[in-house]
Amino acid sequence: MKRQSHLLTLPFMPFFCLPESVGIYRDEPDHTVIRAAGSLNNFNIHYVASGKGCIEIDNVVHTLGPGEAVLYFPMQAQRYYSSEDDPWDVRWFHFYGSGLQNYFIERGFHKNQLWSIRQPSAFEEAHEALLTEAETHRMLKPAQLSTLTYSLLAVFVEQASALSDDNKSNSSANRILELLPIMQQEAAQPFILEEWAARLGVTTYYFCKLFRNVMEMTPMDFVTRCRLQMAKQWLLDHKEKTIGQIAVEAGYPSVSYFNKRFMEHEGMTPSSYRRLYGV
């Protein structure tokens, strides 16, 4: 089964990015692509939703499975194909834009071609939105196409981690992801690392290592972001409360430490933030 939409390439690009084509190949065991170096002048990402496929890089064959992807830069040689025994459901899109080279290089995406997506559903939903728009309107709404392309790229950049031999399995990542809503909800409570590690049945060292692998930050960094996000909202919603009261309710008994953390993240004090919005 194939779904694909090929779009006009604009010679003068008014947007940050646009798709050249987007689609899905499913149950196509003969799906094979070979492109010589220099033959394709756009980026492309191929993401495996299910099944398996192979990517050849420098004469080495790499097998990709569910939740994994390959990123090609313009002009790179490309050779990839579906497994015959377990054909892949591969979601792909080709895209272009004058600022994309720096965008990816600044974030280190030139160092690897193979990636694991920590939250596959987020990528698949964003890809489906782009494909549906391309199928429905083609180039009638270029601004919408650009917005959806950037949304998909943002999910990829946020969720991708380089594939390596010591990567944690998707099941391990899911254990952390399932905890995030609870950690966000309980962020204002005292953060006790031992209790969170115990919820997963692992040591504190392994919990921190696994959390960093999945989220690219420490558990305390995540809790801090949640606390400050709550505090920002409360600073505007509860005008009658002092900065000290907001600090305590957000999990900071010390107002000076709250001010310090707020300044680090927002570049201003809580009082300045209130004044900025007329409070």
Image (cartoon, rainbow, N blue to C red):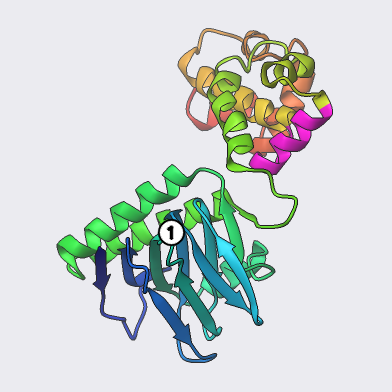
Q: Nearer the viewer, residue 11 or 24?
A: 24
Spot occupied by residue 13 in the image (x, y as percentages of width and height) = 37, 78
Q: Is residue 270 visible?
A: yes
From the viewer's perspective, tell me whether residue 220 is left or right of residue 22. Answer: right
Spot occupied by residue 266 in the image (x, y as percentages of width and height) = 64, 37
Spot occupied by residue 177 in the image (x, y as percentages of width and height) = 57, 32
Identify the image quadrant of residue 172. top right
Q: Residues within 10 Å of mark 1 (few under 14, many from 20)?
A: some
Q: Nearer the viewer, residue 241 or 48?
A: 48
Identify the image quadrant of residue 150. bottom left
Is residue 94 positioned above or below 179 on the image?
Answer: below
Type of secondary structure dominating the magenta stretch: helix
Is residue 210 covered in magenta?
Answer: yes
* Amino acid type at image mark 1: Asp
Spot occupied by residue 86 in the image (x, y as percentages of width and height) = 43, 59
What residue sits 56% from the left and 8% below the top? Answer: 241
Residue lying furthest front? 85
From the viewer's perspective, tell me whether residue 200 is left or right of residue 7. Answer: right
Residue lying furthest right? 205
Q: Which residue is mark 1?
A: 86
Is residue 173 positioned above or below 98 on the image?
Answer: above
What residue sits 71% from the left and 18% below the top? Answer: 196
What residue sits 71% from the left and 29% below the top? Answer: 219
| Bounds of the magenta segment | 205-218
- Label 1 secondary element: loop
Is residue 124 covered in magenta?
Answer: no
Q: Is residue 271 visible?
A: no
The quadrant of the rendering that contains the N terminus is bottom left
